[in-house]
Image: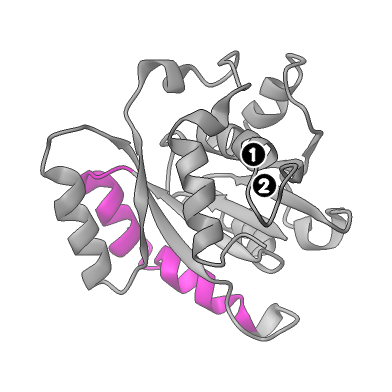
Amino acid sequence: MLIANVSPRTGGKTTDSGLLAHAVAETKTKKAPRGRKVKGFDADHSQQFWQWAQNGEFSFPVDRLASARFHKEYVLPEGVIGIADCGHSENHPDITDSVLRVADLVILHMAPTAGDFERIIEPVDKTTLGDMIKRTAPLRADLTAPPAVVLLNRTVPNTKSSKNYRNEMEAEGWDVLTTTIPRSEAFAQAIGFPVIGASAGPFGALVLELESRGLLK
């Protein structure tokens, strides 16, 4: 299966993609007693995901594929979980559209802020991320839009913002994950951040939630 990580703008999505990918590979469950095989795709012109992988700590390959032909050019071996780091959707909608045509799950990464909420719900060009996901349905093999969930990212403990924006997003019809990713200066550095042991933190909890909900296959 292919997981598409999307966001309206920059917001820690590349870090999330890398650590989620490692947590998927490391996390051992009844359904995956040895963890899972993983392959990364850098569908962002910044190429940060790919550059991070060049440090030698990644246990899986990452392909550079920031292209509106992603759906035609990507190669995902059978039995492997693909993790795609999409470019900012408000700047590169053509790439996001292409990835969504073949994604099995969409994770929308969102900081609990007015800026992110407004970019998702009421962007300048009036094309919401929800609209982008829905419009791919006629172009997909099963003629249905991929399932999508919201991951609250860069959250601050003991504040009301996460709860408030969770409620706001649910009121807009989005499915918001229980797991959240805390704000961390270490996470913000991304490239060079140690990846081994990612399953021990919030990304391991994220993997377990996705599996328990039948979203990680």
Residue at 70% in and 57% down: 2
| Residue 47 lies in quadrant | top right
The residue pinned by badge 1 equals 21
- Measured as percent of width and height from the top left, residue 29 is found at 63, 49
The residue pinned by badge 2 equals 83
The range drawn in magenta is 111-137
| Residue 54 lies in quadrant | top right
Name the amino acid type tagged 2. Ile
The answer to whether one can see residue 89 in this image is no
Residue at 34% in and 68% down: 174
Q: Nearer the viewer, residue 207 or 110?
A: 207
Instruction: Estimate how packed mark 1 is, as few (under 14), some (14 to 19) or many (20 or more) residues with alpha carbons within 10 Å.
Output: many
Counting labels gives 2
Q: Identify the secondary structure beneath mark 2.
A: strand
Compared with 137, 32 (above or below) is above
The reply to whether the magenta stretch includes residue 120 is yes
Name the amino acid type tagged 1. Ala
